[in-house]
Image: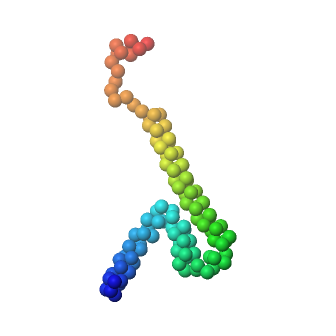
Amino acid sequence: MNTTQQVLIVLAGLALLPLVIRLLRMAHLLPAALYLFATRLCFPGWAAANSRLCAGLFAGTVLYFLFRWSWKIGKRLHERKRRIADFVNNARPYYEMPEFQRWAEQ
């Protein structure tokens, strides 16, 4: 691989970085990605020396992810139930019943 190809790969990676960060933030996975970046690439020696702290930080990022997604799903379910109840409570018939049908139902 020559220098031009390496430069193009780095530029493509830098161009895609904002998109990747935005997608990770939307999926609530940015803290986990930052943790993995820091412990695997930036500070592997510190991570090896402080394995318990790293395990706690990783557990915290996973719990954050699970909490945010469960909150999001719970909010959507609650909103859906509220919309259905609102629809049922405010429903109106599409047409008016003729008199003879009202009389037959009684």
Q: Quadrant of the N terminus?
A: bottom left
What is the x, y in percent for residue 43?
A: 58, 80
Q: Is residue 2 left or right of residue 30?
A: left
Q: Nearer the viewer, residue 48 or 66?
A: 48
Q: Position of residue 95 (x, y in %)?
A: 33, 26
What residue lies at 57% left-to-right and 75% top-to-bottom? 39
> Is residue 18 something that shows in the picture?
yes
Vertical order, 27 against 90 (above or below): below
Q: Is residue 67 left or right of residue 87?
A: right
Q: Is residue 104 left or right of residue 62?
A: left
| Colour scheme in use | rainbow
Give the answer, above or below, for where 12 lies relative to 24. Answer: below
Q: Residue furthest front?
A: 1
Q: Is residue 11 visible?
A: no
**Picture coordinates of residue 92 (x, y %)?**
39, 31
In depth, the one of 38 and 67 nearer the eye is 38
Q: Nearer the viewer, residue 104 or 50?
A: 50
Taking the spot 42% from the left edge, 33% from the top edge, the residue there is 91
Q: Quadrant of the C terminus?
A: top left
Percent x, y of residue 79: 49, 46
Q: Is residue 102 left or right of residue 74?
A: left
